[in-house]
Image (cartoon, grey):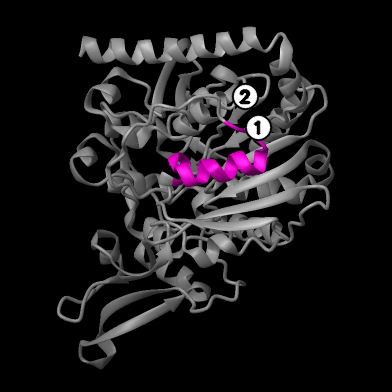
Amino acid sequence: MLGAALRLRLRVLRRRLRGQRRRRRSRGGRAAVEDAGREPVLLVSGMGGSVLHARRRSNPKFDLRVWVRILFANLDFKKYLWSLYNADSGYVEPLDDDVEIVVPEDDHGLYAIDILDPSWFVELVHLTMVYHFHDMIDMLINCGYEKGTTLFGYGYDFRQSNRIDKAMAGLRTKLETAYKTSQGKKVNIISHSMGGLLVRCFMSMNHDVFSKYVNKWICIACPFQGAPGCINDSLLTGLQFVYGFESFFFVSRWAMHQLLVECPSIYEMLPNRNFNWTEKPTIQVWRKNPEKDGTVELVQYEASDCVSLFEEALRNNELTYNGKKVALPFNMSVFKWATETRRILDNAELPDTVSFYNIYGRAYDTPYDVCYGSESSPIGDLSEVCHTVPAYTYVDGDCTVPIESAMADGFAAKERVGVGADHRGLLSNENVFELLKKWLGASEKAPRCRVSKKPRVVDLGS
């Protein structure tokens, strides 16, 4: 254990030393000329892609990382991250009034999106599924980008709406900081997954500001029209981020479900009812029809009528917190908020001065239609759906976002490129890195050490 912790510490020190050497070199000669002309890069994470800390208002010294946390993951997740939506404010608020959830700003915002659990234990058992923007940050540093000068990160509370005031103000501050630090050079944004929806909301609501500060927007794996299979199922049965051996260290599917039912960001990624899908995504339920002597039927719900299913299936959903029962039905207030977010997203226009690039994942089975029950084992009461293992029909995509949704940005893109990688794997894919270097006009100075990533991961931002 001590050896693993020491290796992790040494790796961090090596990265710092590399940065210091580059800073010394950049004070003179050709490097100074290159840095003077380099446009800053801002990395924007997606669902689950930011470190979250819990703090207590009654105890200023209390500061605990609660996402991602491998050791005691379920316990701390339930205690600090389970929340309720406040329809008056539009914010998701912890069940414990004394707790506030914050995103650490260390390392110019990069710490929160780098290794999501930077503990010795992660290094010891080699849980690379929490290495989020880590490889991309290393690649950009190797190209000459410097933290706090030409490289910044933006992590945010991904439970909240993609258009909530705090997230919009935080992104504006990051853009202004990068712009001013680089002496008036426009910013190149690289967003991943739901981070693309957050950027799109900002662009729609702050068009002139976006035009002033942004030069290029490179979007990776964005669910522009939703992620039908994953999101529909996440509202009904939850979301499992990690499979196999690693799942024993992670938050359970049920614990995640109880959080997602109150998350505006999840509702905002439901399949777009106004989008012209090649085939409309559906939820299917094998049911006994009491009006037909218990005859088993396959009932289909399209995006336009899934709300009735969600309401019926979740009507008895609840959790226990500090010995008290808390009802968590399908939240119509959140759904109405998300409907307005969808209108804002659909009305977004790309400024003429901004170049847009789209990278999407392909060659992976991606959930599309979801089915509960079977002809031989049908669902009786719809509340049983929440305790049923789903079956999927699949389309091409990145395991999370179908190609059709990821490509449907609606902008005049400079390029759209499909890369054979899964949702999170796109963040460490060498083909993606080559595209980024081409579009940014950057090149690496020396070979990088590459870490093999094998765990099977299904996620929305990480």
Question: From this viewpoint, which residue is outermost toward the left?
Answer: 376
Side of 125 where 441 appears, left or right = right
Q: Residues within 10 Å of mark 2 (few under 14, many from 20)?
A: many
Say which residue label 2 marks: 145
Chief secondary structure of the magenta portion: helix
- Residue 57 in percent (x, y) is at 51, 17
Is 5 on the left-hand or right-hand side of 279?
left
The residue nearer to you, when weighing 231 against 395, is: 395
Can see residue 322?
no
**Vertically, is 241 above or below 304?**
above
In the picture of the structure, the residue carrying the numbered disc 1 is 41
- Circle 2 sits in a helix, a strand or a loop, which is it? loop
Identify the residue at image location x=81%, y=40%.
209
Q: Amino acid at mark 1?
A: Val
Secondary structure under tag 1 reads: strand
Please tell me in which quadrant of the rendered image residue 74 appears.
Answer: top left
Image quarter (top left, top right, bottom left or bottom right) of the C terminus: top left
Question: Who's the residue at 35% across and 33% down the image?
Answer: 77
Outermost residue, bottom side = 292
Let me know if residue 438 is in the magenta part: yes
Q: Nearer the viewer, residue 271 or 378?
A: 271
Q: Residues within 10 Å of mark 1 (few under 14, many from 20)?
A: many
Which quadrant would the N terminus be assigned to in this image?
top left
- The answer to whether marks 1 and 2 mark residues whose Cβ atoms lie closer than 8 Å is yes
Q: Position of residue 86 (x, y in %)?
A: 56, 43
What percent of the width, then of the height, locates residue 268? 55, 55
- Residue at 70% x, 51% y is 356
Measured Cα–Cα span from mark 1 to mark 2: 8 Å
Magenta residues? 426-443
